[in-house]
Amino acid sequence: MKDLLIIGAGPAGLTAAIYAVRAGIECAILEKFSPGGQVVNTYEVENYPGFENPIPGWELMSAMEAQARRLGVPIESVDVAGIRKDDAADSFIVTTADGGEHAARAVILATGASFKKVGVPGEVEFTGRGVSYCATCDGAFYKGRTVAVIGGGNTALEEALFLTRFATRVYLIHRRDEFRGAKILQDRVLSNDRITPVYDTVVGSINGATSVESVTLINKKTNVQSEQHVDGVFVFVGYEPNTAYCPAELLNPAGEVIVNRDMKTRIDGLFAAGDLREGSIRQIVAACGDAAVAAVHAYAYLAEREHR
Ligand code: NAP
């Protein structure tokens, strides 16, 4: 049995492990994919302190992973399917999709969030054939071509700017008349002559024969429908928490884990940190901050039990 299991190896999970191992806690990370989380798909990170110039997302996360590994944190590749408390043993059983079980005295949940779908006809059918959720991964396929970006938050604005490296025209389709993203990004978007903002508009469907050829646009103010030729559609309409494996009693109606200011969930010994928690501002530095808080309180929880 481990003292502490951390589920997820994004910024929160890796930070929690770095803090835990330096406090002398025997811990391990369980991660479904490769370490790094959503940040590996971010072209450049400009607001994580300590770097004078923007740093590629994958590079930042490789450095965090290397730091955790240097300190001796094992990262196991497993898909966590459930978690329950064994009250008699005062410990947790984490179950995995392959039928495995891992036991620990305390657990930190750090599985982050995933891209939300926009939910229009054609989205699922054309995913991988013109519909994408990752400009870093797929942007280069659109050299000299036309794409649509759906969304108006920081992600949509950042990724629209990134896509102008390849696409000659980027239609930025937003359902309101004002972007949600940061002012600095709005200024960059509005002064980029490859980006055409399309306000007050939603995508009704994504169309094509074998791959994306157009989007049907609906102006929300006039109800006028139009067809816009595009070769690709990038969807950036927010995130949903990765908490399907969590006991329902931990979650709010949006599926986010409810925590107190010490990152404690409703179950004693179970903590949560990062984008999956209620009230998260979904920033790398905030996920790292949450994780430090969770690890410090996990240490206190474990220490209290040792001395009972
Ligand atoms: P977000 O801030 O939740 O924005 C989602 C955008 O998609 C909003 O503009 C929203 O419109 C629109 N939207 C939502 N559902 C839609 C639908 N069904 N159809 C059409 N449009 C829809 O999500 P995000 O941009 O992915 O960012 C998530 C979090 O990460 C935020 O806290 C953000 O600040 C943070 N982030 C920060 C940075 C950075 O600091 N550099 C970079 C990326 C992300 P409305 O505006 O009308 O609601």
Image (cartoon, rainbow, N blue to C red):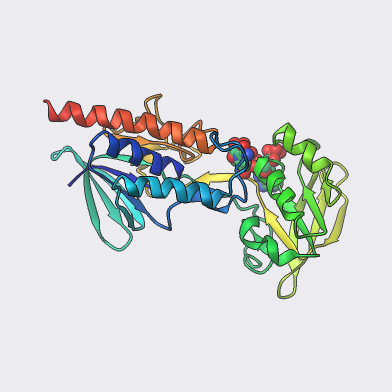
Q: Residue 302: x percent and y percent? A: 21, 32
Q: Residue at x 66, y 67 (%)?
A: 126
Return the residue nearer the eye: 307 or 47.
47
Q: Residue at x 43, y 45 (%)?
A: 64
Question: Which of the four quarters of the rendered structure image does ligand 1 lie in?
Answer: top right
Return the residue nearer the eye: 40 or 228.
40
Return the residue nearer the eye: 56 or 269.
56
Q: Residue 88: x percent and y percent? A: 13, 39
Looking at the image, residue 32 sits to the left or right of residue 158; the answer is left
Q: Residue 186: x percent and y percent? A: 76, 37
Instruction: Specify whether residue 284 is in view.
Output: yes
Q: Residue at x 67, y 40 (%)?
A: 154
Q: Residue 105: x percent and y percent? A: 21, 39
Please identify the quadrant where the C terminus is shown: top left
Looking at the image, residue 166 sits to the left or right of residue 96; the answer is right
Q: Place residue 46 in its image quadrant.
A: top right
Q: Residue at x 74, y 48 (%)?
A: 161
Looking at the image, residue 146 sits to the left or right of residue 275; the answer is right
